[in-house]
């Protein structure tokens, strides 16, 4: 496993499966009366959020706290960032505070990449501009595998604003690594001009793509796209690329509907679809905590500054949590 | 003209020609040929060195007045001399903008005082570079600075009527409009070349068509009004084709390419290090090949650095908030050596043409770009083609360090530069 998680492309197939398997074990713990593990006791995880994202920040915060890490939330609002401090100076400050991991959300593509050059701790990308959001892709893959039992050969259709979507980029890369077949469906204006070089199929007709999809993932349409000639009107977008009940009926019986949230009900997804039994939207949120726990555990667990294995988990980051280490989980309770 | 001290330069290879000695006296090349001697002259052993006419840059940002934290006329011209330049054209996007006779004369005088190379101010096309109203082009042309090249560089003269009028107006005094070709609506928020890399990196694309569409329009406008257009920093294969077509019609269109566009590609953006952020952006390997071929066959007339210094804090940031631009004066000849000479595309006579004679002709500097023969002004550079070294910006005279060539091994070394017979650089170091 690499020191940082900036792109889904940083993960080998083995790395990705290790994270998903670890997340599965950690998810089972969530059902227990005491959910907390002492694994990252004494470690400091900084949530450095330059963009509002309550959902992702809370998810990372919950994940770090369940592993007993100290969590510092550093939001761009009301901080020195608002006074014009540069990312580099903020990085040096976090470095001086001894951050073991920095979880960064930033509106600029590549900001986590830059940060990784300035801090010694691990950098985890929690979404950068229109680039990537690798933990979202991991939780999406985790959700697909839980619902459908496999990822290899799974047919995943991702619909909407691919051009500006960090979720789409990370999903295409990770799902390819894990053996799924991805089809992107979008108006041509919302696809990168060189999308043909991506390891996926591209289509413009959503209704034609649905009958062969095991998973359909709807992307949010950002308000700022609506007046920039990417499509004529919101209603036309919704008619051509929205998922309503009639379109959902074109899906195979077993297919699931995903959305990274927050949703525009009535635009890219109809309310009755969002609330249907096929929808995994609420599960995705719950799975996000397990997956982020696994990422923090695997990235920080093996690099104990005290020299020994992290408290409570015998196997560290050396492999999947073995029966012995599961035992350690029990002890940790 | 001072020049009390004569110089005898011994055994240099003159451009692509033979070995010769040169005697420099009173600012001129007094004699050129084999086996010369001159009593009392200081002798410079130039065996193994190539003598080229002093380089001329059509596109330099000296930042003074206004951004002296990035560069001054003094530091910028030191950098120029160290790079083998004897004349630079100072772009107009200073603060205040060089859009009046007063400002261009100020810059011209600062250049004269610094004395490291000639500084020829470029005048703004429009007042304040705002693209609304023509600046007083005639007043700048008539000033002591004798401005002939006008440009809003950094911004495109987008308005077709304004561009047409500018091209027409400067015919009265033989001026040329140097256009920064960038269709602004197609490049709103643009960060890097639009293509495979921009899609992967999630950075807003700067499509080739945004450059090519303006070049095509401006070629047609220049033809329509019978005026002279110069295209700044051509960066795409398509632009080369459009300029080739315009030239085939006999229209008065000239063009430049930067050293960085001859060597680097957009794949460097994958580092998200803004030292690779420049406008127009680095393009693809296919574009680099087309630019090299275009420069070799003369469709692109010359190399111009677009030397754009920025302080560290404007580059040590996230990519999208960083300033556009790269320094280039101190590495230009070495990069051209690597990209054009080592590849066999140009010989040294070709380099002299593309980096001295052609830019001097476009900029109408009659004291520069002349052949190294008796009677020419003694503006020349002695270059060691056998040297190789790793680029270290800490060694640069420029006040800024934003060179994309840091850590790269490049061929060559400027050994000496002479401006009107006086050394500005000796042994690779500033002489004054």
Image (cartoon, rainbow, N blue to C red):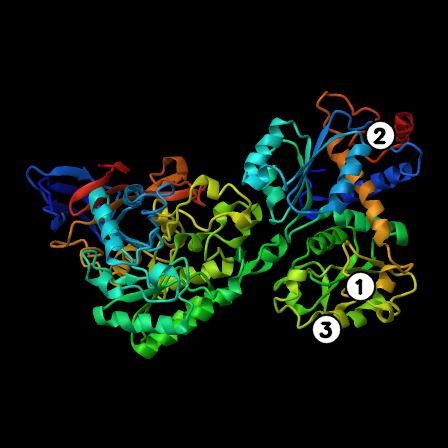
Mark number, residue A37: 2
Q: Is residue A72 left or right of residue B79?
A: right
Q: Quadrant of the N terminus of chain A?
A: top right
Within-10-Å neighbours for mark 2: few <14, some 14–19, many 20+? many
Residue A129: x, y in percent?
Answer: 63, 51
Mark number, residue A269: 1
Residue B46: x, y in percent?
Answer: 22, 41
Within-10-Å neighbours for mark 3: few <14, some 14–19, many 20+? few
Identified at 21% across, 68% down, the residue is B173
Residue B275: x, y in percent?
Answer: 48, 45
- The residue that mark 3 highlights is A236
Q: Is residue B36 left or right of residue B74?
A: left
Image quadrant in which you'd find residue A264? bottom right
Look at the numbered disc 3 and give the secondary structure of its residue. helix
Identified at 35% across, 41% down, the residue is B398
Look at the numbered disc 1 and give the secondary structure of its residue. loop
Q: CA distance from mark 2 to mark 1?
A: 38 Å
Image quadrant in which you'd find residue B100? bottom left
Q: Is residue B407 visible?
A: no
Q: CA distance from mark 3 to mark 1?
A: 13 Å
Chain at tag 2: A
Chain at tag 1: A
Q: Is residue B401 left or right of residue A213?
A: left
| Disc with the residue nearer the chain's start (2 vs 1) | 2
| Disc with the residue nearer the chain's start (3 vs 2) | 2
Q: Is residue A293 visible?
A: yes
Residue A333: x, y in percent?
Answer: 90, 27
Chain at tag 3: A
């Amino acid at each position: 496993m690499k020191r940082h998680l900036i792109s889904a492309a940083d993960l080998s197939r083995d790395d990705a499966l290790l994270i998903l398997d670890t997340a599965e074990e950690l998810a089972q713990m969530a059902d227990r009366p005491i959910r907390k593990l002492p694994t990252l006791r004494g470690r400091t995880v900084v949530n450095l959020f330059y963009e509002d994202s309550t959902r992702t920040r809370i998810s990372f915060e919950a994940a770090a706290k369940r592993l007993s890490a100290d969590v510092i939330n550093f939001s761009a609002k009301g901080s020195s960032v608002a006074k014009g401090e540069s990312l580099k100076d903020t990085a040096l400050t976090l470095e001086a505070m001894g951050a073991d991991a920095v979880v960064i959300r930033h509106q600029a593509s590549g900001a986590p990449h830059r940060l990784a050059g300035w801090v010694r701790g691990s950098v985890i990308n929690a979404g950068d501009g229109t680039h990537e959001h690798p933990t979202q892709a991991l939780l999406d893959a985790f959700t697909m595998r839980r619902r459908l039992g496999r990822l290899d050969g799974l047919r995943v259709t991702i619909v909407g604003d691919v051009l500006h979507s960090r979720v789409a980029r990370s999903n295409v890369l990770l799902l390819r690594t894990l053996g799924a077949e991805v089809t992107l469906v979008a108006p041509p204006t919302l696809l990168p001009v060189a999308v043909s070089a991506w390891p996926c199929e591209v289509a413009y007709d959503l209704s034609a793509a649905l009958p062969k999809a095991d998973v359909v993932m709807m992307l949010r349409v950002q308000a700022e796209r609506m007046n920039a000639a990417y499509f004529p009107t919101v209603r036309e977008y919704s008619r051509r690329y929205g998922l309503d009940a009639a379109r959902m009926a074109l899906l195979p019986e077993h297919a699931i509907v995903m959305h990274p949230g927050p949703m525009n009900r009535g635009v890219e997804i109809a309310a009755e679809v969002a609330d249907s039994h096929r929808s995994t939207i609420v599960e995705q949120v719950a799975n996000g905590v397990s997956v982020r726990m696994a990422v923090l555990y695997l990235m920080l667990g093996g690099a104990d500054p005290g020299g020994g294995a992290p408290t409570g988990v015998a196997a560290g980051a050396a492999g999947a949590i073995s029966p012995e280490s599961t035992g350690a989980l029990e002890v940790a309770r | 003209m001072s020049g009390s001290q004569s110089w005898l330069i011994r055994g240099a290879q003159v451009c692509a020609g033979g070995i010769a000695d040169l005697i420099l006296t009173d600012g001129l090349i007094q004699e050129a040929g084999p086996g010369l001697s001159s009593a009392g002259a200081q002798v410079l052993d130039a065996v193994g060195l190539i003598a080229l006419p002093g380089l001329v840059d059509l596109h330099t940002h000296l930042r003074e007045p206004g951004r002296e934290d990035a560069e001054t006329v003094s530091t910028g011209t030191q950098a120029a001399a160290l790079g083998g330049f004897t004349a630079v054209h100072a772009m107009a996007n200073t603060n205040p903008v060089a859009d009046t006779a007063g400002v261009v004369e100020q810059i011209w005088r600062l250049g004269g005082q610094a004395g490291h190379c000639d500084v020829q101010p470029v005048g703004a096309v429009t007042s304040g570079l705002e693209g609304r109203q023509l600046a007083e082009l005639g007043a700048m042309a008539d000033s002591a600075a004798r401005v002939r090249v006008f440009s809003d560089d950094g911004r495109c003269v987008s308005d077709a009527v304004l561009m047409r009028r500018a091209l027409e107006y400067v015919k009265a005094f033989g001026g040329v409009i140097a256009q920064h070709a960038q269709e602004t609506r197609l490049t709103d928020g643009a960060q890097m070349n639009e293509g495979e890399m921009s899609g992967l990196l999630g950075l807003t694309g700067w499509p080739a068509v945004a450059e090519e569409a303006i070049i095509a329009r401006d070629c047609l406008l220049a033809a329509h009004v019978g005026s002279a257009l110069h295209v700044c920093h051509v960066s795409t294969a398509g632009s080369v084709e459009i300029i080739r077509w315009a030239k085939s019609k006999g229209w008065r269109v000239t063009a430049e390419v930067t050293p960085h566009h001859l060597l680097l590609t957009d794949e460097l953006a994958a580092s998200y290090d803004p030292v690779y952020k420049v406008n127009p952006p680095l393009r693809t390997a296919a574009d680099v090949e087309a630019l090299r071929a275009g420069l070799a066959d003369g469709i692109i007339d010359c190399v111009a650095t677009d030397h754009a210094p920025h302080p560290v804090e404007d580059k040590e940031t996230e990519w999208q908030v960083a300033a556009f631009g790269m320094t280039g004066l101190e590495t230009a000849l070495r990069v051209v050596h690597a990209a054009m000479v080592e590849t066999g595309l140009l010989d040294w006579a070709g380099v002299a043409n593309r980096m001295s004679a052609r830019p001097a002709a476009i900029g109408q500097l009659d004291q520069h770009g002349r052949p190294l023969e008796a009677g020419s002004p003694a503006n020349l550079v002695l270059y060691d083609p056998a040297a190789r070294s790793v680029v270290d910006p800490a060694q640069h005279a420029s006040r800024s360090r934003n060179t994309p060539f840091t850590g790269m091994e490049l061929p060559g070394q400027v050994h000496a530069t002479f401006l009107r017979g006086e050394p500005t650089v000796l042994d690779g170091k500033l002489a004054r």
